[in-house]
Structures are given as structure tokens and as C-alpha cells.
Amino acid sequence: MKALRIEIFIFFFLASLTATSQLSGNFSHDECTIGVASGNATSDGRPMVWKTRDYSSAPNNEVKYNTAYRYKFISVSNAGSSTYSWMGLNEHGFAIVNTLSSDLEAGSSGPSNGAFMRDVLGNCKTVEAFRHYLDSTNQSGRKTHADFGVIDSTGEAAIFETSGNNYWEFNADDSPHGYVIRTNFSMTGGGSTGIERYNRSSDLIAQFYAGDSLNLKSILRYQMRDFSDFDSNPVSVPFPHQWSPGIPKGYINTSKSICRNSSVSAAVIHGVLPTEQAGLSTMWTILGQPASSVALPYWPVVNTPVEADGESTSPLCDIARQIRSTLFDFVSDDEYINSYKLRDGNGAGLWSCTFPFEDSVLTTTKTFMDSMRTLTLLPKNVISLKEKSLAQRALSRLKYFRQSLISGVPENKTGLIVIYPNPVQSGLLNIRYTLKKNAFVKIEFCSAQGQVLMVLANEKQSPGPHVYQIHREVFRDNGVYLLIFQQDNSIKTVKIIVRQGK
């Protein structure tokens, strides 16, 4: 029966391939992974919807703020002039994501997937309004064959399997545990495209739910950065084996993973409780291949910073793409990622830098959100400054992380600041820099997890040389530490290595 179903699917898929590619792109390069969870399933009671976008033909993604419709919204779009939305959130807390469904039939007229999502973000406040929109376009037609995941500020969450003139709803609260997952097939059509990612995602979300940890961080960290084999089994990082003959040790084939070589962005849209202001719904977005970048929060009530939406491309996505090229460095087959560059098993690798930074963003943003939830009127200027500050800081860190990844050794100087010796074994860690003019300087000595252990400076300083020293005894353990150096609006981070010494 399974073989017959696959043969039927292949027949119809090949028959419609040409028309489909014109409408929405080739399935082999546009196989996204999505899910929704109601507040009854999540650990904090707030609904979530998430998506990993796989579309190697459009690697430049941005977070755009759109004010041209009835409701203002933010969305992930292709860089440049495109107004299509591929996942987004509006000011009323309505959010939508999609993934192509290979076994549903698109219509011949009406909006395509990206235009459809843009239009509903601009015109729908709730999931109920989205149903009405689907009802109306059932009559007029849609160039869609997709699974759409949606949530709203009332806490409702659902996935709609949608063809050109019909739809089928799968409400999260009607499912056994309050969540629904899709890849590139529909339950209605009975296909199987992306079944490996569906099975792996289902296993992960079930584990999170069982452990009461179905939340923002679990999805970002463990679902969106997950690698698996062709049978949906997890693959460790680093991968201390040879995938197949001719492949170097440590390289993982990502073609069937949630985190794939063709993944270009990802987002977890974190909703609100029904008693909270809808504008505090947050779109946590990773611009670039998820393993190569960090997640940052964006809110649908303010314009996005230039780091996320540049004149032509997003600087955050640009640097993530550069990091990605360093990770996927097996020239003979770009499906493979070098797992030892992510995590080398000895406390180093890209993730030893990006994950602690992302943790600090999650922690500080939670504190910020808790303070915002006590207000009756949202201070948009404060929210905008928060977004911009985090984006600037992330861009600076990612540039440094990339350089460290390329060099393979810790840098001992960055810009005006010089740090020696590095690695530290005994004696003193010396920190020197010279200011050319008056400047505000803040120097923080932190653990690898971002915990501030010591503040060396936090003041306006005069031009000239400045020197600080830290005794070796301050370093309680061997390992990696961070020195964060801020001069006015510029932030630089230096990784300090502490080794066993006398």
C-alpha cells in the first residue's frame, strides 16, 4: 500500500512539476518545516507558530515592516523590492507561516503563497477572520497549495491545509496534545514529501511537551538546529564518524534534516496571553542558515532596524551567509556540514560562541518583556531602541565569531583594544587600549554563558592610553570567557582562553 501511494504521488508530482515551479518554486529546494502549539501545550501558556524556511534560490532574507495595509505587520521577505511575506506577525497578534504541500492542487488564479500571506497579515486580526478570508477566496481562487500555520492574540492556533479552492482545518486544541506539525504533505492529500523531517520534528516536539519544555528556546535551539539521518534518527554534534565512503570524518549530510543546507531563515512567533497587549507578540527570527546565526526579537509595532532590513540586503543575513560558507566547506557536495566547526568536543566551535550570546538575548529580552507587560501603553520608542541595540550587538558578535571560526585561534586584539597573554595560564591578563577622543567606555568580563563576572569600566574616559589588569585567580575555572568592550556605540567581543597554569 505504501509503495502504491508513493507511485501515485510521483506520477501526479511529475505531471504538475512545470506549472508548480512557476507558481511556487521547486519542491526539492522549498521544503519548509512548520508547527503550531496552543497555550494549552506550551510551558508558559502562550501560543507559538514556527517555521524553518528552505529555499536556496532566495538566500538573502530580511525582516521588513509593512505599513501599506489596514494593519501594520512585520514579515520575513526576500531581500530587495519583494513585498511577499514568507512568515509574519501583525500588530494585532495574528501570525502566519507556510510550507508547500506537494499533494494539494493550486488554483489557476488569485494570490500565490507569498502574496496571500502578505494580504492576510494586512487584513486579518484573528484566526476566525482568516477562516472568512479563506471562505471568500475559495470562490475567487488562490494560486496556493500549502499548509498555513496561524495563531492569534486570543490563543487560538491551527494549521490549514489549503488548495486553490478548498481548505481543511486542524486546530491545535483538537489534537491530542495541543500542537500540529507539517512539512510538505497534507493529511488530506495523503502524500509523504518531507516525511523524514516530519517524523523527526514530531519526536522532538513530543519530547518537549512531555518534559513541559515546549517553549521558545526549545524550538530555536534544539528543533531548528537539529540534524538527523535518512531514517529520522538524531545525529550528534560533533559527529565523530564518517557518513559514507569518500566523505571526511565529522561531516553530516543535512539533506533530510530540519536544519538543512537549503535553510535560509527561521522564526518562532511567540504569542501573548489573552490578557496581554497583542503588540507584545514577538517574532524571534534567525536570518540565514539557522546553524550559522542567532535569533533576535522583532515586534510588529515598530520599524525594523537596518541590520535586519538594509538598503539591498540584511547585514545580519550577509554575515550569516559568510559563516554558512565556512561551515558547508566540503567542495564535492554542499549537502554536508562540518560538525567540528560547530562544536569540537573540547568547548570550542561556533556554537560555543553563538549559543551563549543567544542565551543572553533570551534572558535580557524576557526581563524587558516582563517590564512591558505591566504597562497600559506600549512605549514604541523604547521597543525600537531595544530592537536596534540587540541587532547592532548581534551583528558585531557575528563578525567576530566568523573571524574566530576562520582563524581557528583566539584573536588577541580587536580594533583599539589589545589583550595579552591569550591564552592565559598564570600571572596577569593585561588589557590596553588608546582613545583618540573623549568616549564612553564600558568593559565587562563575562562567563561563556554571558554572566557578567566583573565590570572593569563604565564611564566617560579622556583621550590617551588606558590599562587594566585581571589576576589569574579571578578565573575560577579553565575554559572560555568573554571580554565585552564598548566604546560609545561600538561593541567588540574578545574570547579569552584560560588554561591550566601554575
Image (cartoon, rainbow, N blue to C red):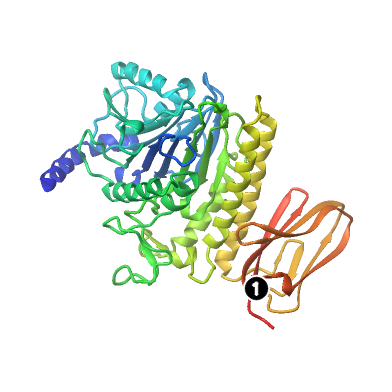
Q: Secondary structure at mark 1?
A: strand
Residue 323, given in percent of the width and then of the height, sits at 52, 57
| Quadrant of residue 171 within the rendered picture | top left
Give the side of residue 108 with respect to residue 208, left or right.
left
Amino acid type, label 1: Val
- Whether 428 is drawn above or below 386: the answer is below
Residue 192 image-quadrant placement: top left
Quick one: label 1, few (<14), some, or many (20+) residues within 10 Å?
A: many
Residue 370 versus residue 65: which sits nearer the camera? 370
Foreground pick, 232 / 133: 232
Residue 304: percent from left, percent from top? 60, 36
Q: Which residue: 66% across, 29% down? A: 380
Q: Is residue 276 above or below residue 386?
A: above
Q: Quadrant of the C terminus?
A: bottom right
Say above or below: 485 vs 393: below
For label 1, the residue is 498
The total number of labels drawn is 1
| Residue 218 x, y percent position in the rendering | 46, 49
Taking the image as shown, residue 397 lies to the left or right of residue 207, namely: right
Residue depicted at x 36% and y 43%: 32
Compared with 264, 342 (above or below) is: below
- Pick the front one: 384 or 406: 384
